Amino acid sequence: MTVPVQLVRTATNDVAGELTTETLIALAERQIGAIHVRGYYPVEIAAQVVDKAINHPQLGHYHKEHTSSVGRVYMPHIDTKWDPNLTAKYHDAALPAITEVRSMFHPYLAPIDRIRLELQELWPAGANLMRLRGRACFVGAFRVFQPDTSEFYPHNDAIDQETDAPEIEGVLNQLVANVYLQVPDEGGNLQLWLREPTPEETKTILEVEGLEASTVEEPVLEIHPEAGDLIIFSPRMLHAVTSGKGVHRVGAAAFIASKGRAEPLVFWS
């Protein structure tokens, strides 16, 4: 059954303050710019996991020039680099990694598990774990930004730039959900341009995973999250993260693909 979108505001740069069926559909259909839920996850539980993420034995770094200073716990799909051996390694580790990340929050519900459950309930056709060529994907990666040095340059993310698996056919939009476990008081801001990159920008992003700030206009939105916040937006559009001061910026993240209201959402990292 199609769920009508009923919003007071419809400008694409609006930020919704609640996660509901209506705001989720509006975001997936690009009627709003982001969903930002303050205090989504208990900060006292988040704080217990921060050091575990920063010092995790599986903490590695993204493989491209402009993202190499940003840490991530467990391999994300983007780092399979179209390589069959790396792709097999990613899928082999997916379910054990989900279990291990979940155990880090035990006995409490992990933030990405909460997102998965709520989107399954809120989206008209439900939501499932992504499988590519029939193999389960990992979901629930931690992103660890070093103080003063780590940042994401303006870039975008698109699953069809990482795989040609048949399961991605029909994807209309891609979202990303971030739950913030620790954020510096200064910096660590999320910047959103609310537009997709040009073909020339896309070429640069694919090479080095980011554009020099001087080559793009000012972002349309800039959001400073706080620990415990949830932000969901479309990473197919340009976005960036500024460097933070003093402490690590740590969050848990999940990508979400939408094929329209009649199809289930799917999750991966």
Image (tube, grey):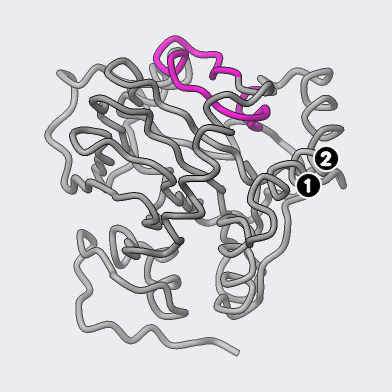
Q: Are marks 2 and 1 in contact (CB under 8 Å)?
A: yes
Whether residue 70 is in magenta: the answer is yes
Exactly how many numbered labels are in the figure? 2
Whether residue 100 is in magenta: the answer is no
Quarter of the image with the C terminus is top right
Neighbour class for label 1 at 10 Å: few (<14), some, many (≥20)? few
In the displayed structure, 233 sits above or below 68; it is below
The Cα atoms of the two marked residues, 2 and 1, are separated by 5 Å
Residue 232 % position (x, y): 41, 56
Q: Is residue 240 left or right of residue 220?
A: right
Give amino acid for label 2.
Pro
The residue that label 1 is drawn on is 99
The magenta-colored residue range is 60-79
Quarter of the image with the N terminus is bottom right
Give amino acid for label 1.
Thr
The residue that label 2 is drawn on is 96
In the displayed structure, 20 sits above or below 82; it is below
Query: Dot 2 lies on which element?
Result: helix
